[in-house]
Amino acid sequence: MPWRRLTITLAIIAPILALLAYGFTRDAHYIVSPLIAKPATPFMITLFDGRKITLDDLRGKAVFVNFWASWCLPCREEARDLEVAWQKVKDNNMVFLGVALQDTDKNSLEFLKEFNVSYPNGKDESGKIAVDYGTWGIPESFFIDPQGRITYKHVGGIRAALVIAKLEEAAKGIVSAQEGKGDYSAIR
Amino acid sequence: MTANLGHSSILLAFIIALAGIVSPIIAARSGDQRYLSIARYAILAQFILVTLAATALIYGLVTTDFSIKYVAFNTTRATPVYYRVTGLWGALEGSLLLWEWILIIFSGVVAWLYRDRHKDTLPWVIMIFCIVSAFFLGVVGFLSNPFEIISPVPLDGRGLNPLLEDANMMTHPPLLYTGFVGLTVPYAFAMAALIVGKLDEAWIVSTRRWTIIAWFFLTAGNLVGAWWSYHVLGWGGYWAWDPVENAAFMPWLPATAFLHSIQVQERRRMLKVWNLSLIIVAFSLTIFGTFLTRSGILSSIHAFSSGPVGGFFLGFLAVILLASFGLVAYRADLLKEQPELDSMVSRESAFLLNNIVLVSALFTIFLGTIFPLLSEAVAGVQVSVGAPYFNSVTVPLFLFLVFLMGVGPMIAWRRASWDNLKRNFFWPATASLTLGLVLFIWKVRDFLPLLGFTLLAFVVLSIFYDTGLALRARKRIAGEGILRGLVTLARRNQRRYGGFVVHLGIVLIMMGIAGSMTYSLEREATMAVKQELQLGNYRVQFEGLKGSQQPTHFRVEGAFRVFHNGNDQGILNPALKFFPTQQSPVGRAVHQSSLDEDIYLILSGFSEVDRNHATLKVLVRPLVIWMWIGGFVIALGTLICISPIGKPATLEE
């Protein structure tokens, strides 16, 4: 009786295929960050203008940390938005910090000039900051409240309105349950 | 121009492939035999067109025609010509074209070789080839087109990933693809046999050689991949149980099982459904492998470009599985088994056990590979299983397999008598147990390696013992010496003695794996100039660092003098390469091989201030070289199996 065999075959094959198809509904790179609501790892970064900043210096302010590189297309797409957001919030006890990684200084500086970026930017020389923050796709942004806790993480491009909204939440110490996601480039 | 020529060839070939699918059906419906020759010409035409397309792409790569996006992304003006050619499989689009090219070459050879035979099944074989070919042509033509144009034309290309610029990367993908594609041949014959309803052993007999060839290329492809990983990646290992590696290895398991179980069907007319299932599974896994690699559904250390092709591969996989197993179910009445196993102590049952072990290994590896997906679907959390899982489940299975490798070829068919067992196994078993005891007394005290080495010795001894007995018979019958006798034996029974040689190769590979898995030494230390580090029989002395600016990167090289048992072995220079756009430096490990062990040096860091300190990781990996030697032994065995040196076998075996 072929029907019985056929049913058995189908019963074995169909779940496997369904499982594989399910694979398309999610992003294998995407892992929920364990850093949310935890104290942000301290770091020191040398800015492109030569100043040195540590995360501790920024305690008491809401901080927006953005990882980027000049070769990353989604970074280009969000660059103008970030500058717009910065112009809006810079006097409200809020800080922006751009962290360039896997990039040459020359290309990074050209990128900053192209988009008229005016907030502080530095280079993650050894890649250690990116490792500490579990960065896997850029741009990647972290929001840190005045007590130094990470309140929100966004992988991929982000819009100005969201940056401002999340910074205001960070200023009040509100932690987001969900992480955000946009277009990103995987880092090598 | 080049791009247009290539792309139109692909599109035309796609249409012809569709004709090749339809014409056997029309021929069967109408009885008009002329439609059958259409199918054959369809293969020929596809062969010409795909060769034209592949040549066009290679021409574009060699002449650095950057108006073709694929060329711009995979070569630069500075790329040497041979790496421009290998750019053909440097990324997804070209790889698929290469796959299709190999497939159509195989199909052409099959259609030509069997032009006067298998009159009833050959059109269906060609139809299956055309289906697979049409799928790949469709993907290459419409989804992942290697001939896509970019404008404006860039001045220079981006180039290959520097890690891929290596001689082994020139051979690894084509070998693997050839293995994958080779499995299409037995699969196509199996499907044709099911369609026609001629389910005797004919399809197995006519594809036996093809299966052996495919199996060899699969083995070689995996080994070269392991060698590349060991030689270039600089982590001291050769296998990481990464999803992509598993994808390449998984088809090997049912293919190996199939090679053994078809012998049971040939001899005893048993396992018909089983053999059909094995070849369907093996072929499906080649498609599954590409799906896994290119869909991005699992994260892998192998950064492959993925595109929109994943869904189509999944769809094709679904079609293959449902249609093939559907056909098996449809023909269930013709597949009724006749004989049963006569005894559990027989060659049939040894082969059956071998199959069960291989399929279990496949199942556990498959499960481990898709586990992140499964756990996320069921529990909502992505959990990966790593090397410890794979090692702990597969090692016992493979050890059992080694045991069967010693037993299977020598034990009698149907029912092994006590005499047969005693005659074939008493001396090999006694000798290998003695050797195990010696190893234990000498230094091997851990259970698994001790068992492993004893079993491996058992396989070798049983092969030598059996061959020795046969040689003695040759001497008695024909007065032949050892060499002459070996040649006669190999010619009389190619598959048996070729198989023995392949088994010896597998033993060598297993020996390398067992040695390096269990007795590797590892040490990492920061050393000042002239300081020494001792590991096993080796002493390594740090002689200094040297930095140099290379065209694409800055290179820091350490000089380390290596002493083995006090003898100066010369200087090794592990290096770190700093590419400006890569986060961490790319290591260039170096190693020195000998028959008993390799020493492997990795420069893991250095002091940027005074350049007098370096951190060095030293690994001593015993017996690794035997894995690569084993590969060559397998090649020799395969050659003995398939080369036309044979004389008709007499009844003595």
Image (tube, coloured by chain):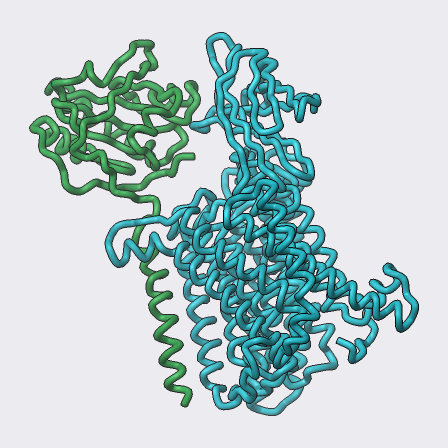
* Residue furthest out toward the right: B479
Q: Nearer the viewer, residue B182 or B143?
A: B182
Q: Is residue B269 above or below residue B576?
A: below
Furthest toward the left, the residue is A172
Position of residue B353 relative to residue B225, above or below, is: below
Chain A shade in the render:
green
Residue in the picture at 51% in, 76% down:
B274
Question: What is the display colour for chain B?
Answer: cyan
Q: Looking at the image, can residue B133 be seen?
A: no
Residue drawn at the location 68% of the way across and 59% of the way down: B502
Quadrant location of the C terminus of chain B?
bottom right
Tell me where residue A140 appears, x and y as whole percent: 29, 33
| Horizontal relation, residue B469 to residue B98: left or right | right
Q: B352 and B155: which one is in front?
A: B352
Give the percent coordinates (x, y) of residue A106. 43, 19
Q: Is residue B542 left or right of residue B390?
A: right
Q: Position of residue B419 (x, y in %)?
A: 67, 75
Counting the numbered discs, the total is 0
Who's the residue at 53% across and 28% down the image?
A: B587
Q: Residue furthest top?
A: B610
Residue B518 position, x and y percent, is 52, 42
Residue closest to the eye, A87 or B170: B170
Q: Residue at x 33, y 9 (%)?
A: A50
Residue B279 visible? The answer is yes
